[in-house]
Amino acid sequence: MLSLTRKPKQALLWLSLLAAPAALASESAKFVGKSIDAQRAEAVALADSLWNWAEMGYQEYKSSAAMQSQLKAAGFSVKAGLAGIDTAFVASYGDKGPVIGIMAEMDALPGFSQAAVPEKRAQAGMTSGQACGHHLFGAGSVSAAIAVKQWLAQSGLPGRIRLYGTPAEEGGSGKVYLVRDGQFDDVDIMLHWHPASLNKAPVGTSLANKSAKFRFRGIASHAAAAPEYGRSALDGVEAMNMMVNMMREHIPSKARIHYVITNGGAAPNVVPEFAEVFYYVRSPSAESLVPIWQRVEKIAKAAALGTGTEVDWEVIHGNHSVLPNTALARVMHQSLSQFGGYQYDDKERAFAEKIRATLGQRADKVWGNEAKIAPFSEEISSSGGSTDVGDVSWVVPTVGLRTATWVPGTSAHSWQAVAAGGTSIGHKGMLLAAKSMATTAIELYRQPELIQAAKEEFNERRGKDFKYQALLGDRKPPLDYRVQK
């Protein structure tokens, strides 16, 4: 059960532990700043390559190889093909001391062909795009890991740094298979970040999420000459959708249900013998999600019974909610605050103003966020989305941040996000994230008591009886879920 409260004694302990000497913290930030700035050209080139390739979940072969190559050149040992996934890998440096991992996503989204221009314009030859900024996520994390490796080599302090290349976040739950495979079992702390339109290190959570493709099978027949012989698989899909939509009135207000009909038949004059609907169900926790999902499965069976069809389903993915960690979030906020935001140059400002004009009034309230750091708050906030980072956070104390890689007011999964992510606006936000994560890792190595405080909070929030179970069960990774068939 997720605990939202903290004991006063522990809160005071965190404050004392996190009040690191400013001069020492500043030296860490200075080292990281120089390292990341020296890597800028390589980081930007890597991000731009991932942006141009825009490879989708489990198909990120060029992206994964490029990230691995850069890490090998920097002195990391690399192991690829984790958990039966070709594009998943871990790059490691160090042989003793605390293990800190950094996540690096890389996958793109279908249907987001977009050039790096401030108007909606498809890019020739592209059918997908980095609408969630995972190219920046991947490249920025690589740079952060390299900076930490350099610091460990120079400082001589014990510590092990790992960069986890994690594919298929967008609906593929790539990290869940790594968790299930035990890839994080010996990790002390995990760090991550995400592109956004503001700079913030929140005490954040997310929605748990589960999806499946429900496949109905009926009997084909001539829809006009012999309809009595047919049993419409599409009727099964529509009956299911109708009943699920009625169920919406009777689920918790923070739960979400989405679906698309992925196959509804081929011709109106043929009773469809096959139809498919793809469902997502979200809820604030796995505990509250499971009973909703069970009702959806019962509805599918009822729809098949009522329409004389048959139904089966394939679970595609399942993610736990993110388990927040206040102790780690405070360290990340302190690191982020040392670097501050960034300023647009004239070219970037002109680009941003044109994007702003497409965003409506929502952009007016947040304009200028790229130059500011959001205040720290211990109040738990939810992104409203879902991520497989959640599963990692239930087995390892985990923290993340967001930086303004997009024009303020931009939504993820939009053409505006793709466009900005291919420009220097995206690059600046990426480098800010890399510096913040690397500095956070160094402060954790320097002050192992911070790691201990994070673990204590982690154990308290999980509860003593918690046992991790993947929401997607024992299925194998859906390596072809983005392959057009």
Image (cartoon, helix red, strand yellow):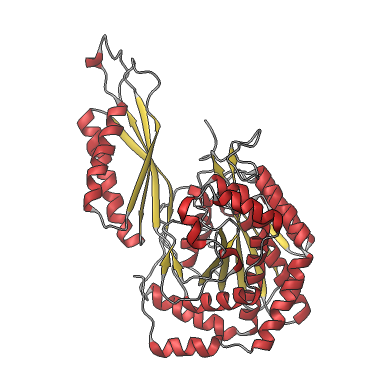
The reply, left or right, for residue 26 in relation to residue 192 is: right
Q: Nearer the viewer, residue 343 or 332?
A: 343
The residue at the point 62 percent across, 46 percent down is 118
Specify whether residue 67 is in view. no
Q: Is residue 477 above or below residue 20?
A: above
In the picture, which quadrant includes the N terminus? bottom left
Q: Position of residue 223 (x, y in %)?
A: 29, 15
The reply, left or right, for residue 220 in relation to residue 330 is: left
Specify whether residue 51 is in view. yes
Q: Nearer the viewer, residue 191 or 434?
A: 434
Q: Is residue 264 above or below residue 414?
A: above
Residue that protrudes farthest toward the top in the picture? 225
Q: Position of residue 409 (x, y in %)?
A: 51, 56
The residue at the point 65 percent across, 61 percent down is 430
Q: Quadrant of residue 221?
A: top left
Q: Position of residue 35 (x, y in %)?
A: 76, 70
The residue at the point 61 percent across, 67 percent down is 371
The residue at the point 58 percent across, 70 percent down is 372
Q: Quadrant of residue 336?
A: bottom right
Q: Count of labels shown? A: 0
Q: Position of residue 405 (x, y in %)?
A: 61, 58
The reply, left or right, for residue 452 in relation to residue 473 is: right
Q: Nearer the viewer, residue 216 or 132?
A: 132
Q: Nearer the viewer, residue 14 or 309?
A: 14
